[in-house]
Amino acid sequence: MTQSLSDKDVRVEFVVEAPPDRAFEVFTVGIDSWWPRAHHIGAGDLVEEVMEPRPGGRCYGREADGTECPWGTVLEWDPPHHVAFSWQISLDWKYQPDPARASRVDVTFAPEGSDRTRVTLVHSGFERHGTDWGSMRDAVGSPEGWPALTETYGKAVAG
């Protein structure tokens, strides 16, 4: 895995042991198989993570009592090559309903042979979160942020 944190974005690149169609499917509609339960902005216990498979689809967590906790919207859906979604989470780790104040996550899936895929995740547009946007960039770029999530994702793809 390679990771870079620039002034403007977080980039994580790694290879998974699966063809692009499986890598894309597990990352998107299979998000519940790898998203850690502790990474949740809702008040209750997270029981399911959902990414609806279409442009305009919702990204949300479902809590034990059935409450849905939104955190983003699917912006682009091009299986098995690319998915993009908004990161509608405020600097105080609450849902941000205003899409103009959301950053963006782009994930691409490129074949490397018949059973391997290079996954590149770029989280950008942090400045849209407001004046202290660097705190969000630093949090998602930290070892507990996207790098940790890509590890749980990689295990789910291989498993």
Image: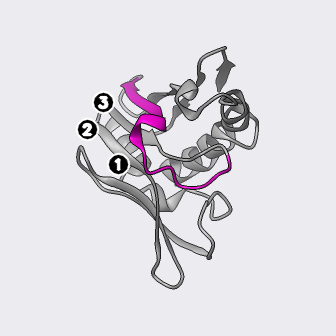
Rendered residue at 52%/25% (across/down): 124
Residue range corresponding to the magenta coloring: 92-111
Q: Amino acid at mark 1?
A: Glu
Task: Tell me which label, 3 or 1, sits earlier in the chain.
Answer: 1
Q: Is residue 1 left or right of residue 154?
A: right
- Is any part of residue 19 visible from this angle? no
Cβ atoms under marks 1 and 2 closer than 8 Å: yes
Task: Between residue 20 and residue 37, name the one nearer to us.
Answer: 37
Q: Is residue 70 left or right of residue 14?
A: left
Q: Amino acid at mark 2?
A: Pro
- Residue denoted by label 2: 79
| Residue at far top of view | 7
- Residue denoted by label 1: 25
- Classify 10 Å Cα crowding around label 1: few (below 14), some (14-19), many (20 and above): some
Query: Which x, y percent locates residue 55?
Result: 24, 43
Q: Give residue 110's mark.
A: none
Rendered residue at 70%/30% (across/down): 132
Q: Is residue 52 left or right of residue 92?
A: left
